[in-house]
Amino acid sequence: DKFSAYKNFELINQDILKFNIADIFLHPRGATRCSSGVNTVRLKVVANLPYYISTPIITYLFEHREVIKEIYLTLQKELASRLTTGPGSKEYGSSSCFVQFYSDARILFPIKNTSFWPAPKVDSCFLKLKILSKPKVRVINEQLFFKLVRAAFNQRRKSLKNSLGSLLPQPVLKDCLKSAQLKPSLRAEDLS
């Protein structure tokens, strides 16, 4: 009732993980189209996510990144830190690589737990994810790339030679690391 007069507002009451966000993009209210019929606008997502399903929602949003320009999220401080940290940090992991592959991620500001009622047991952060026009690294097979990333971080304290050994025979892995000019003794957390 409060926003019915606004052409740029539409309320949709659905489970985000069961909803096709691209449908909004195909038929948004007030969107303009260029001569080819393609929308000239992309969505900005702003959300205060339930902390227990933050990762599935972020994954979902990246699966629909072609219709999204920016994502602004209130997240648990520890998760936001993991998503924005770089190589060499204990927090750096496969989720950091996933988010940073598709976006420029940065924490805009912290939010104390006392800002909410009832107050959660953890502090939060407001995070900005600016979707990149193309990923930071060109890969032939994204599914295989992320399988390698997950395997490399699955056993954090092991070297690449050992953590990736389950995916490739050791002679092939040794050749791959050599051609990439990577020492087999490096760990996943050492690489960008």
Image (tube, helix red, strand yellow):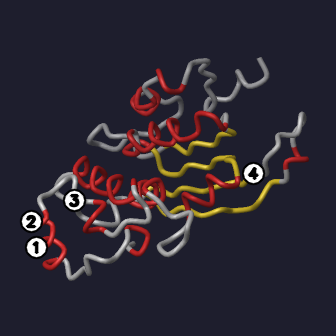
Left or right of residue 30: residue 179 = left
Using the numbered discs, state the Cα–Cα distance from disc 2 to disc 3 in whole angstroms.
10 Å
Which residue shows up at 50% across the image and 75% down it? 88
**Percent position of residue 54, x then y:** 58, 39
Q: Which residue is denoted by mark 2 in the rendering? A: 172
Which residue shows up at 45% across the image and 30% down it? 21
Q: Please say if the residues under marks 4 and 2 sit with CB atoms less than 8 Å apart.
A: no
Disc nearer the start of the sequence (2/3):
3
Disc nearer the start of the sequence (1/3):
3
Q: Secondary structure at mark 4?
A: strand
Q: Secondary structure at mark 1?
A: helix
* Quarter occupied by the N terminus: top right
Disc nearer the start of the sequence (4/2):
4
Callout 4 environment at 10 Å: few (<14), some (14 to 19), or many (20+)?
Answer: many
Left or right of residue 110: residue 52 = left
Disc number for residue 175: 1
Which amino acid is tagged 1?
A: Asp
**Percent position of residue 181, x then y:** 21, 82
Which residue shows up at 63% across the image and 23% down it? 11
Which amino acid is tagged 3?
A: Gly
